[in-house]
Image (cartoon, rainbow, N blue to C red):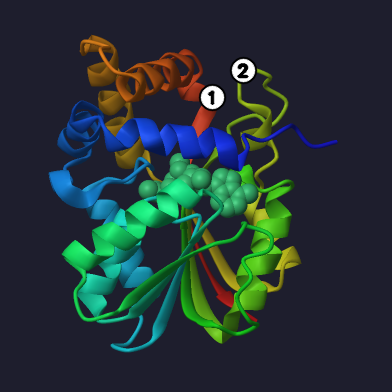
Amino acid sequence: MTSPRPTAAYFDQWYADMAVSPARDAIVARTLGLPAELEVAGTLPWDGIAAMTAALHPAPGATLVDLACGRGGYGIEIARRTGAHLIGVDFSEVAVRAATALSARRLPGNRAEFRVGTLAASGLPDGTADALMCVDAVQFAEPPLAAMAEFHRLLTPGGRLALTCWEAVDPGDDRVPARIREVGLRRDLPQAGFTDVQVHDMPDWRAAEKTMWQEALAADGTDPAVRSLQEEGRSSLAAFDSLRRVFATAVAG
Ligand SMILES: C[S@@+](CC[C@H](N)C(=O)[O-])C[C@H]1O[C@@H](n2cnc3c(N)ncnc32)[C@H](O)[C@@H]1O
């Protein structure tokens, strides 16, 4: 049995709150070492973007899909570095609008498009992607394997996948959110049709995340986006050592 997931309406409100909270984005950017204008919702630090870019290395003009892209910051940065054409998909219409606006500022030349779709049903045709990324979101698919099957459907044969997430140190540990306990990348990526699956532990990324939660909790919680970051921080720190930060790469077989 799978656990209930937050809805698109929940995320619409989450992103609407972020849109009016420079304080939230400043805490995230400072602690993860990101440019303030990147507008991310995940917790990937600056050197994580380099790791994802190296793993995906789309050729100039190749299509990079960012699934569950949020406001688009990470995918836009990788498209800037590589010259790829970016397609971002998220089920939050508010996020998709924000991503469209961000790409107009950070990625001129019509090199990005964003659309509403889900992790398991993106609405894009088979074989759209030469490379596909998913940052801190695969756990929201119910089950995560459904998203991995969609990643595989979207990639051309030989196309590269890079994703970041968390896994439970002990999947039986009920301090870990149920949706994270359902993530098993070494088990599910091959089942979805991927080969060359590599799952790396990323303790430095986890440490950056810890600093982010600690700084969020020390901040004045004056707006809903900062308060939401604080709530997430409290629950993340309470079970901190029960989760591993993971970075997975794979090839569509
Ligand atoms: C933690 S945020 C990460 C966003 C983005 N990847 C980033 O790192 O900035 C998780 C994202 O997953 C999206 N999401 C959650 N469930 C989804 C689903 N079933 N289909 C599509 N998007 C989903 C949310 O709207 C949100 O944008």
Tag 2: amino acid: Arg
The circle on residue 176 is none
The circle on residue 242 is 1
The answer to whether residue 213 is left or right of residue 4 is left
The circle on residue 175 is 2
Q: Residue at x 30, y 21 (%)?
A: 226
Quadrant that contains the C terminus: bottom right
Q: Residue at x 43, y 16 (%)?
A: 231
Q: Secondary structure at mark 1?
A: helix
The answer to whether residue 72 is left or right of residue 83 is right
Q: Is residue 137 visible from the viewing direction of this image?
A: no
The answer to whether residue 192 is left or right of residue 180 is right
Q: Secondary structure at mark 2?
A: loop
In the rendered structure, are the residues bearing label 2 and label 1 in contact, judged by CB atoms less than 8 Å apart?
A: yes
The answer to whether mark 2 is within 8 Å of ligand 1 is no
The picture quadrant where one finds residue 177 is: top right
